[in-house]
Amino acid sequence: MITDFLLDHSALVPVALLLVALVCLGVGHLLLRARRHGQRIMWALVALSALPVLALTLVPTATGQADYVGCTVQFALPAPGRVELLANVALFFPLVFFATLATRRPLLVLAAGAGLSAAIEALQALVPVIGRACDTNDWVMNGIGTVVGVLLARAAIALAAVSRA
């Protein structure tokens, strides 16, 4: 269902990815400047950002059990025409962006993001009853979203530090 929607509106996916990044940067900048409650709100946004990750990767599909137990091994690069790949980049971006802002530990968040994506793909491969397909492209694209999220969060932290000085 989500893939069908993305394919029907493939031109909007890169725009949506850019908008997600811009909104995260704007909100992150405001929260970094906030003296009161900024940290608490960042953690709330981490939790809120985790919901789509879990819902779109681990909630059982309507069709039920997957026909294939295992993992499809393939590698492709994100491109405007590959909407599912771009969606996987966008999926992890807000989670790791706000986690990096909240913890100020980019390497830890980078490792956690890659580990979470690998764990999700392993569960999809090993638990066919959820009806999800394990795919190495998903892990790589989630990893790219993790790296981009961490890098932009570090940039936001650096800019906030400069504006305070």
Image: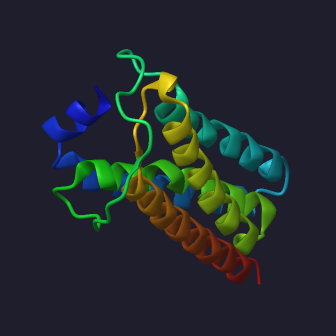
> In the image, is residue 22 above or below residue 163?
above
Place of residue 144 in the rendered image (x, y in percent of width and height, measured from the top left): 46, 66
| Nearer the observer, 46 or 161 | 46
Residue furthest right as drawn: 36
x%, y% of residue 99?
A: 70, 56
Q: Position of residue 94 (x, y in %)?
A: 55, 52
Identify the residue at horizontal 60%, vertical 61% (top origin): 114
Q: Quadrant of residue 123?
A: top right
Query: As drawn, is 47 to the left or to the right of 90?
Result: right
**Closer-to-camera residue (129/154):** 129
- Quadrant where the N terminus is found in the figure: top left
User: In this view of the protein, which residue sits in the foreground, 17 or 37?
Assistant: 17
| Residue 112 placement (x, y as % from top left) | 69, 59
Q: Residue at x 60, y 42 (%)?
A: 49
Q: Is residue 123 visible?
A: yes
As drawn, 54 above or below 139: above
